[in-house]
Amino acid sequence: MKYKIQYKEFLKTFSKEQIKDIKNYHKVINLHKRGLPMKEIKKITNVSKDKLHQWRNTEIKPISIKVLIKAKDKGYFRTISKKKLEILAYLIGYNLGDGNISRNLCNTWFYGVNSDLEDIKKLILNFNVNPVIYTYKVNNGKMAIHNNVFSRFLVCLGAIVGDKTKSKIKIPKWILKSEKASELKKKFLQGFFDSELSEIRLEKNKVSAYKSLKLYASKNKDYIEDGKIFLEQVKYLLKEFNIASSEIMLDRTYIRERDKGQMQQLFFIIYSNYINLYNFINNIGFLYNSKRVNSSNKALSKIKPLVKNELEKIRKYKISIKLRKQGLSAYKIAKKLNIDSYHIKNWIYFNRKPRLYNFVANR
């Protein structure tokens, strides 16, 4: 997939006043190159004498022009390589979770465990910026990129600025339009899940039964429907990777302390039966959240043989039904399939199916 930032999209990250400066600057420079005197240029453009002097006779330029020049120098308007697109998909996913961009578009932040942020930092270095990691408490902090060009670059790609609870968040079209279960979609989900999804954990006092994974989103009461739309998009992508999830549900309401805003938590769960959990870990999983990666690997080592056994039972169940229609007895079918006759009797006499048959059949 080929993709690049359009110049006109980048311009949308500037204020009306900044765009006015961009237009006036180019007009002034063009008129100056044509040899028009300052009085004539001032009459045509209505730009102040101070600005005309700075723009014509010094290296001083409007901030917006400097940003555009830096963006061009960094290659932000060129076609983005496949490798960089995948990195950006991950960063956008993380931004929609534990990331943020300041309203003045000068700072980009990613929050998390310092050792994990070090891994994400390596990704960001591909874009000629210098992230700094700050520690708030033991091995926990934020990574900051103090760069008003990179922030705008991310915004053009779908990153959210400011308060996400009051934003109409959607998965960027350039990710949604990529092929089914694409690497771009996978990287986006990994970024989002690294920051937002619950950890894979065993049920209390169970050896191999796992808790369902929960994905929460908090929205201001006026943006609840927008939150549902975004979560539906996430569920749609999960389905492409053969992962089943529940309907979106409403959880608790609360008053946010900082602004007394009325908030609503939304969530859905990713089912944790062996096959679905295996599909999640194997097809998407976590990438740079070390705690979740470790719990995933432990779970995978336990459930992999169980998944194999369940799928083998389902395969033999289908064969047993066909053999029964051919007139074979339970004992002959069991012998032929090398399986305990107890299972065959349940399948052909009592119409009982393997535990996960319906789940697999409906995928």
Image: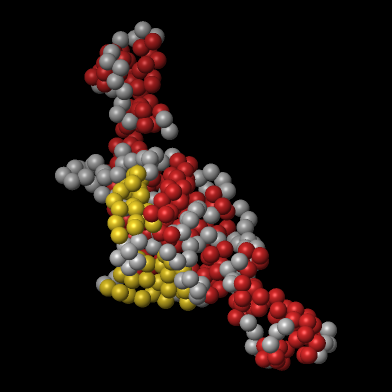
Give x and y (percent) for residue 49.
70, 91
At 50% across and 45% down in the image, what residue appears? 181
In-front residue for pair 23/175: 23
Q: Is residue 199 left or right of residue 61?
A: left
The chosen color scheme is secondary structure
- The residue shown at (46%, 47%) is 229
Which residue is outermost to the left? 205
Classify 74 as above or below 268. below
Q: Look at the image and tell me whether residue 86 can be seen.
A: yes
- Image quarter (top left, top right, bottom left or bottom right) of the C terminus: top left
45 on left or right of 89: right
Q: Judge whether residue 287 can be spotted in this image.
A: no
- Image coords of residue 348 (percent x, y): 31, 15
Quadrant of the rendered image containing residue 244: top left
Name the residue: 36% across, 7% down: 327
Q: Nearer the viewer, residue 108 or 238?
A: 108
Residue found farthest to the top = 327
- Compared to residue 282, the image places residue 6 above or below, namely below
Q: Is residue 324 above or below residue 152?
A: above
Q: How many marks?
A: 0
Q: Residue at x 54, y 49 (%)?
A: 176
Residue 251 in the image, given as x and y percentages of width and height: 30, 48
Judge by depth and name the residue closer to the eye, 254 or 248.
254
Q: Could you say where residue 304 lies in the image, as x and y percent from the top left?
A: 32, 41
